[in-house]
Image (cartoon, rainbow, N blue to C red):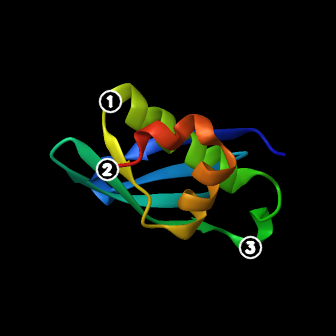
Amino acid sequence: MAATQVTDNPAHHRFEITADGELAGFVEYELSDGGIDLTHTVVRDEFEGKGVGGTLVKHALDAARDRGLRVTPTCSFVADYIERHPAYADLVA
């Protein structure tokens, strides 16, 4: 996988992942009092199957934990990730 970096873009309500400086995908969110709803995940076609989506969601969940936020996994990709990684189950609202 290319060198990736995940950043929070609060102006666009999403976490973004770049691969070698190119936008590879994002996970959109909605904040509420004490919670974050991860609503939609997008990975550009050329980055699918390379671990980009998992890296992105892991970062979003770690950020939620660091901020003390409860997670609503509206996005099916996020919900599936949490199911496969039960260490994040305690975050689910």
Q: Amino acid at mark 2?
A: Ile
Q: Nearer the viewer, residue 43 or 65?
A: 65
Question: What SS does tag 2 mark?
Answer: strand
Marks 1,2: beta carbons within 8 A? yes
Residue 11 position in % (x across, y down)? 28, 53
Q: Position of residue 41 (x, y in %)?
A: 54, 65
Please indicate, yes or no, whether residue 57 appears anywhere in the rendered image.
Answer: yes
> In percent of the image, x 82 and y 55: which residue is there?
50
Q: Residue furthest left?
A: 33
| Circle nearer the viewer, 1 or 3 | 1
Residue position marked by numbered label 3 in the rendering: 45
Q: Residue at x 61, y 41 (%)?
A: 86
Which quadrant of the view contains residue 43? bottom right
- 26 or 37, which lies in front? 37
User: Residue 2: x and y, percent?
Assistant: 81, 44
> What is the spatial separation of the Cα atoms under label 1 and label 3, in whole angstroms?
31 Å
Q: Choose the circle earlier in sequence order: 3 or 2.
A: 2
Could you say which quadrant of the image residue 65 lies in?
top left
The answer to whether the residue labelled 3 contacts the one labelled 2, judged by CB atoms less than 8 Å apart, is no
* Label 1 – label 2 distance at C-alpha: 10 Å
Binning the other alpha carbons within 10 Å of mark 2 as few (below 14), some (14 to 19) or many (20 upward) gives many
User: Where residue 19 appears, x then y in whole percent?
Assistant: 70, 48
Q: Amino acid at mark 1?
A: Arg
Label 1, on which residue?
Answer: 67
State which mark lies toward you, 3 or 2.
Answer: 2
The dot on residue 2 is none
Q: Secondary structure at mark 1?
A: helix
The tag earlier along the polypeptide, 1 or 3, is 3
Density class for disc 3 (Cα within 10 Å; few <14, some 14-19, many ≥20) is few
Going 82% across and 62% down the picture, which residue do you hit? 49
Q: Which residue is mark 2?
A: 36
- The residue shown at (62%, 60%) is 80
